[in-house]
Amino acid sequence: MVVNPSAPFVVLDIIQMEEWGFGRRAVRANGEEGSGNLGQVKTESKERALGSRAPQFVKASRALHLSWQVGVFLVGLAIVTAGVLMLALPGPGWLVIFTGLAVWATEFVWAQIVLRWTRRKVSEAAKRALDPRVRRRNMTITAVGAAVAAVLVGVYLARYGLAMPWEVAG
C-alpha cells in the first residue's frame, strides 16, 4: 500500500470488528496494527452500550423479539401512565415516571439516551446544590421566606385572633 504523507486521509483496513461500547474497531494503518475509536461512545465510559438487553434466546427469533418489545413497551407505558396520574394524585409521580423510562430503556435505544441525559442532568443539579455559595443562597431565601410567613401569620392573629378565615365577618 502506498501512502502519500501529505494526503489528509490514510487508508485503513479493518481487520477485526469488536463491539466494545459503540464504534470500537481494531484497524491496520500503513501496515501497523492498532485500535481506533470511530467516535460515538468512548470505551472508557462507565455507561453500557446502547441496544436491547433481551435474553439471547429472545433475540434469536425476530417474531419473539418483536413480541418482547411490544410487551416491554406496554409495561413501560402502564408505569409511565401511573406516574403521570400520580403527578396530580398522591404518590411519587416523577419516581414512577423514571422507573417506567428505565423499563423502556431495557429495550429501546431512544429511552436509553433519554435516561442517560436525565441521569447527567440530575447529577449536575446535585453537584450545583452542594456548592457552598448555592447552599448559602438557598438557606438565605428559605430564612427570608419563613420570616415573611411568620410576620403574615402574626398580623393575621393580631387582627382576627384564632378565627378561621371563612368565619371572619370582614
Image (cartoon, grey):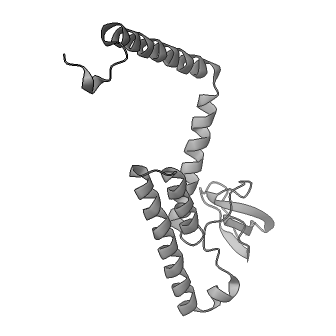
On the rendered structure, is 159 left or right of 40? Answer: left
Q: Is residue 108 or residue 139 the one in the foreground?
A: 139
Image quarter of the N terminus: bottom right
User: Residue at position x 59%, y 49% from top?
Assistant: 119
Residue 150, quarter of picture = top left
User: Residue at position x 59%, y 46% from top?
Assistant: 120
On the rendered structure, is 129 left or right of 156? Answer: right
Q: Is residue 28 or residue 102 the one in the foreground?
A: 102
On the rendered structure, is 124 left or right of 37? Answer: left
Q: Position of residue 114 (x, y in %)?
A: 51, 57
- Total numbered circles: 0
Q: Is residue 111 or residue 147 the one in the foreground?
A: 147
On the rendered structure, is 115 left or right of 90? Answer: right
Residue 19, relative to residue 138: is it above or below? below
Residue 139, quarter of picture = top right
Image quarter of the C terminus: top left
Q: Position of residue 134 (x, y in %)?
A: 57, 22
User: Residue at position x 57%, y 36% from top?
Assistant: 125
User: Residue at position x 39%, y 50% from top?
Assistant: 88
Return the residue found at the far left: 170
Q: Position of residue 10 (x, y in %)?
A: 65, 62
Residue 95, relative to residue 67: is it above or below? above
Q: Position of residue 143 (x, y in %)?
A: 52, 15
Q: Is residue 47 or residue 16 the one in the foreground?
A: 47
